[in-house]
Amino acid sequence: METRPQEGRKGPPRRAVPPVVGLLLPLALTSALLYLCLDWLFVLPPRSAGEPGRCPRGHFRMGPMSNCSPWLSCEQLRTEVRQMKRVGEGAVKKVFLSEWRERKVALSRLTRVEMRDDFLHGLRRLKSLQSKHVVTLLGYCEEDGAILTEYHPLGSLGNLEATLSLPRYQGANTWQHRLQLALDYVGVINFLHNSPLGTLVMCDSSDLPKTLSQYLLTADLGIVLSDLDALPLVNRSSGALAKCGHRELRGDFVAPEQLWPYGEDVPFQDALMPAYDEKSDIWKIPDVSSFLLGHVEGSDVVRLHLFDIHKACKSRTPAERPTTQDVLDTYQKVLNLLRDAAASQTREML
Ligand SMILES: Nc1ncnc2c1ncn2[C@@H]1O[C@H](COP(=O)(O)OP(=O)(O)OP(=O)(O)O)[C@@H](O)[C@H]1O
Ligand SMILES: *[C@@H]1O[C@H](CO)[C@@H](O)[C@H](O)[C@H]1NC(C)=O
């Protein structure tokens, strides 16, 4: 598991400035420090520190709760959860902001019986993959087609630009935070590719908006996976591969091996479509990361530093693409390098 970089929230120790230095130096010092600290001034709620505090399987803890509670039962979901307004809808689920014991929670309901298998697959995955990379499960009821999860008010990752332009989050609209988001995103894919169940492929990702809608932005600007309805297993040693759905995929967001290989003249046939492995997820990383980096001061410099690793992700031969760990290592190196560069630039200014 990757380690989160020191966010440096405390800032550097303060030196006493002798009174003789006049007016200019303190002024330069303040503005330089301000520049350096801009990132730190934006104070985020403390991020939950890794996995040690996690609850045993079948239990959850949310927000300020100090103890773990067992997942809510059908009975509890029916009587204790008050459904309020709809906040999202996909092919499989309708999601409602709801209330449970004076807390906001998210209640997902199966939309149509035809989608029941996907719904149950998603629930099974959600139960097995509880971690900091996945939305917290609070309870479920298979009979009623209901899943209760932690509510994330910022909603889907697709809302990122809107969120970062809110006054409360503008201070986080920096290349540092946005590169950190890319690290978080690749962290989720890395978790899926090395999950306790084996190597899982993130199939619900046929285009960029679809991909982004599978993730939620947390209030402390982290990323969690919320939709686990399409995560088939692959296994290199047994040669087990996967296909994302039974229909033809098109466009250049999906990996080349996900496209129908026999040309326009041969009609698509699921049975003839070759299967592939998790490297199809690696192909998509540069596009998602580029969205996450956005267009703020410094994001083009970051892009420049990520050019080579992203080029490797776009290798047409899946086996030549890097692993999620390779990508994480490179992202982390670039983050450290550019942070150091920004810090020494500030020191030179003093
Ligand atoms: N815990 C949550 N907190 C806040 N919003 C949520 C939560 N879970 C889901 N949503 C919102 O609801 C939308 C739909 O949820 P979800 O992706 O699970 O539905 P789906 O039917 O499985 O979608 P798909 O068609 O991609 O399979 C999400 O994109 C998100 O905007
Ligand atoms: C992958 O396949 C190998 C060989 O068949 C098997 O031993 C292993 O348990 C499989 N792994 C998973 C996660 O299914």
Image (spheres, helix red, strand yellow):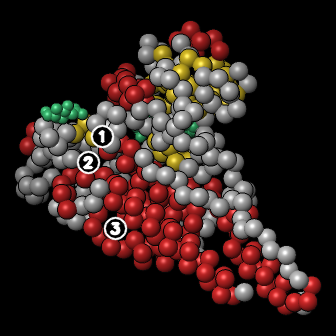
Quarter of the view holding residue 329: bottom left
In the figure, is residue 287 to the left or right of 169? left
Of the residues shown, which amino acid type is indicated by label 2? Glu
Of the residues shown, which amino acid type is indicated by label 3? His
Residue 316 is situated, as x and y percent measured from the top left of the image, at 19, 64
Quarter of the view holding residue 228: top left
In the picture of the structure, the residue carrying the numbered disc 2 is 278
Looking at the image, the residue that sits furthest to the right is 19
Q: For mark 1, does the 10 Å Cα neighbourhood hold few (<14), some (14 to 19), or many (20 or more) residues?
A: many
Disc 1 within 8 angstroms of ligand 2 (CB): no
Residue 46 is situated, as x and y percent measured from the top left of the image, at 67, 47
In the picture of the structure, the residue carrying the numbered disc 3 is 310
Q: Is mark 2 on a helix, strand or loop?
A: loop
Q: How many marks?
A: 3
- The residue sitting at 18% across, 57% down in the picture is 319
Q: Distance between the residues labelled 1 and 2?
A: 7 Å
Front-most of residues 200 and 274: 200
Residue 336 is situated, as x and y percent measured from the top left of the image, at 51, 68
Disc 2 within 8 angstroms of ligand 2 (CB): no
Q: What element carries label 3?
A: helix
- The residue sitting at 68% across, 27% down in the picture is 66
Rendered view: 36 above or below 314:
below
Front-most of residues 167 and 11: 11
In the picture of the structure, the residue carrying the numbered disc 1 is 200
- The residue sitting at 49% across, 78% down in the picture is 301
In the figure, is residue 164 to the left or right of 263? right
Front-most of residues 23 and 261: 23
Tell which circle, 1 or 3, labels the residue nearer the N-terminal end: 1
